[in-house]
Amino acid sequence: METVQIKGLARMGAGKSAARKERQEGRIPAVVYRKGNPATEFAFEPEDFHKALSVGHGRNTLFELDLDGVAGGRTLAVIQEIQRHPTRSEVYHVDFLSVE
């Protein structure tokens, strides 16, 4: 199966305030859930995400997350949930689920 790569940056802290700071800097906050491991928070550029969705199979795309500065480095994941702003079409947050 074809994968699409997204480069993510480590996020300092978790919760609303850290996510808001990422959005202010123009990035999309995200989290990847892994079996038996704590959730990993990161952020990525919106252009990379939109390009990946258009090149792949939409929400069913298999992503190779290259997490810079995060334990675990690279991981394969699928989208679990995409949260969007209620009145604009911009992506607010993405939840990924790791695939083993």
Image (cartoon, helix red, strand yellow):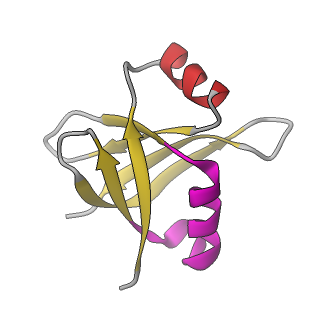
Residue 50 lies left or right of residue 52; in this view the side is right
Occupied quadrant, residue 78: bottom left
The single residue placed furthest to the bottom in the displayed view is 1
Q: Nearer the viewer, residue 90 or 25?
A: 25
In the rendered image, residue 17, in percent from the top left (x then y), is placed at 53, 14
Residue at screen point 18% across, 40% down: 71
Whether residue 85 is situated above or below residue 62 in the rendered picture: above
Residue at screen point 25% across, 39% down: 70
The single residue placed furthest to the left in the displayed view is 36
Question: Magenta span has 21?
Answer: no
Is the magenta region chiefly helix, strand or loop?
helix
The single residue placed furthest to the right in the displayed view is 87
Residue 38 lies left or right of residue 31; in this view the side is left
Question: Magenta span has 55?
Answer: yes
Occupied quadrant, residue 63: bottom left
In the rendered image, residue 77, in percent from the top left (x then y), is placed at 35, 60
User: Magenta residues?
Assistant: 44-63
Quarter of the C terminus within the rendering: bottom left
In the rendered image, residue 55, in percent from the top left (x then y), is placed at 59, 78
Quarter of the N terminus within the rendering: bottom left
In the rendered image, residue 74, in percent from the top left (x then y), is placed at 25, 57
Residue at screen point 42% across, 54% down: 7
Occupied quadrant, residue 48: bottom right
Whether residue 28 is situated above or below residue 82 in the rendered picture: above
Whether residue 22 is situated above or below residue 34 in the rendered picture: above
Residue 52 lies left or right of residue 78; in this view the side is right
